[in-house]
Amino acid sequence: MGQLEGKRILITGAAQGMGAVHARRCVEEGAAVLLTDLQAKEGEALAAELGDAAVFERQDITDPGDWDRVVARAGEAFGGLDGLVNNAAIWWTRPLVEEDADALRRMLEVNVVGTFFGMQKVVPMMREAGGGSIVNLSSIAGTRGIPEHGSYGASKWAVRGLSKVAAVELGQWNIRVNTVHPGAIGGTGMFLVPESEYETMFAEQPLQRPGERSEVSGLVIFLLSDQSSYITGHEHVIDGGRTVW
């Protein structure tokens, strides 16, 4: 029996990259998964690959109407929801003095408001199910100041704080809320440093390498599962020790 046997999970930004890895792992662990993304072609292909346990819906996470539609679809397809992974996000780096207000607003709209809508919209269905687990993807950029990460860092700090408030408010209904804060993860669009530069980049990191997407997914699966049933409101850093000092 898998760690998520019988669970019903919604994952945003699931068509490719880290989200697709989360989706595959959830299905492997016995869950039924609703995948959402703006990339419809890729999302539909992944759902077909995963079989009857997966359903894809195109979604703009900044649109509350889209959230109503995909949550309703989860009810139709699976009869409810037990978990939400707010994975969808955008990212770029830019010096603070070169950033513009419209770009900052866009970053906050996707990374913060999209996450806010997700938590808000799944509450009724999770209450009906007797509880659930919400996992919000943040970043180590949401734990400290990293050069050229003004907009992105601001958004991930906000996700961190918003998640703590949600944990306090939703705990009365047995809905848990936790954040995951990855460091540098290989094989994603957010980390494209050549392997030849690893030795220099990770020389002072206790584990002298980037993380793997499967390692992040392992943590996400744990937080979605009943094994973490007494864990809520916490930040789970997965960074090879990069931020221990």
Image (spheres, rainbow, N blue to C red):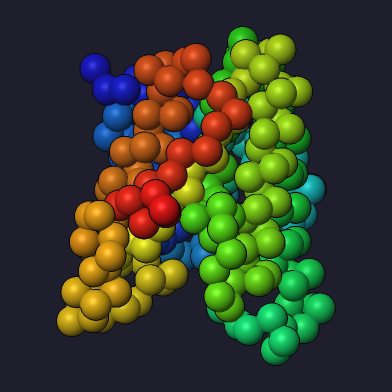
Where residue 169 appears, x then y in whole percent?
75, 23
Q: Residue at x 80, y 78 (%)?
A: 102
The residue drawn where x is 29% and y is 60% is 205
List x then y, in percent, for residue 56: 50, 48
> How many marks can you see?
0
Q: In which quarter of the image is residue 88?
A: bottom right
Instruction: Please say whether residue 140 is visible from this viewpoint.
Output: yes
**Which residue is located at x 41 percent, y 37 percent?**
220
Q: In this view, does 240 lie to the left or right of 104?
A: left
Nearest the eye: 129 or 98: 98
Q: Considering depth in this image, is 111 or 38 the residue closer to the camera?
A: 111
Placement of the N terminus among the 4 image quadrants: top left
- Whether residue 80 is situated above or below residue 174 in the rendered picture: below
Residue 121 in view (yes/no): no
Residue extending furthest toward the bottom: 98
Horizontal arrangement in the rendering, residue 65 relative to residue 140 (left or right): right
Residue 137: where, in percent of width, then height? Answer: 53, 48
Tell me if residue 22 comes above or below residue 206 in the rendering. Answer: above
User: Of residues 181 and 89, which is closer to you in this image?
Assistant: 181
